[in-house]
Image: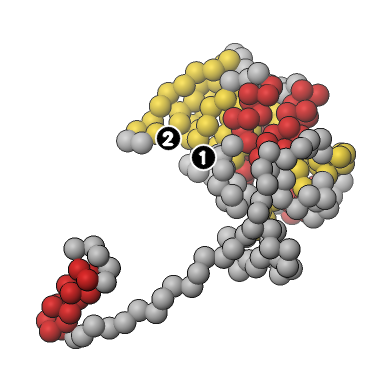
Amino acid sequence: MLQLVCIKQVANTETRIKVAADGTTLDPSGVTWVLNVYDEFAVEEALRLKEALGAGEVVLASVGGAGVTTTLRNALAMGADRAVHLKTDDPAPDGLQVARALSALVTELQPGLVWMGKQAVDDDASAVGPMVAEMCGMPCVTVVCKAAIEGGVARLEREIEGGRELVEVPLPAVLTADKGLNEPRHASLKGIMAAKKKPIDERPAALGAPGLERLALELPPPRAAGRIVGEGVAAVPALVQALRDEAKVL
């Protein structure tokens, strides 16, 4: 079975980002780019299923600029077979554009399973997976935390408020992985060396027209400095007054 894993290159969450001079994009200088953390669970689950079946192919796909190749190589080092780089010069295509590009690839490859992370840590939209499924006419199960694939059927558990939901869907399907689905492996030295020779098919991304217009990006305003209202028991009346008259929470 061919499995397609759609991954995204994102800024490291510990990176201090800056808004670019145009006011609508991020300044890429000094940014450390990494594989989206939820996508790691998707890659690992696809690899485990291939190993359990003893056959099949795991293909990676990502939309982005030239720098995406590095992230694809890192994911190939985990054990995936090959990758498709859907290239674009747009620094931030919206979710609908990305879904169009990926759905065109899904239609071409006809995978038995499409894996993604449940969300990207940069925009937290959680939208691309369901949109790809809708465009391709496939069932979609999101926030998957446990998966069993057998006989053309996926039996899944997904996190919901207060518990877990059990879902069963026929293949092919689109699944988005949640934290806890597995423990992603670290790439071995052998895997890193092998990844350098694995093919990456580069082709233009069929994005189509954007569905959103980004008017501006702004960093949140700095927090106001705190103040000490007193010490010990004597501070209680002043604190209560500040909470009532200034914070308006009492």
The amino acid marked with disc number 1 is Asp
* Front residue of this view, candidates 208 and 106: 208
Which mark, by number, is residue 233? none
Above or below, 242 relative to 155:
below
The amino acid marked with disc number 2 is Glu
Which mark, by number, is residue 159? 2
Q: How is the image coloured?
A: secondary structure
> Residue 200, how many percent across, how many down?
85, 42
From the viewer's perspective, is 101 left or right of 178?
A: right
> Residue 11, how many percent across, how many down?
65, 58
> Residue 138, how many percent across, how many down?
63, 20
The quadrant of the image that shows the N terminus is top right
Query: Which quadrant would residue 20 be assigned to in this image?
Result: bottom right
Q: Residue at x 63, y 66 (%)?
A: 17
> Residue 154, how many percent across, how many down?
55, 20
Structural distance between the alpha carbons of marks 1 and 2: 8 Å
From the viewer's perspective, is 167 left or right of 3?
A: left
- Say which element carries label 2: strand
Circle 1 residue:
178
Identify the mark nearer the N-term, 1 or 2.
Answer: 2
Q: Report the label total.
A: 2
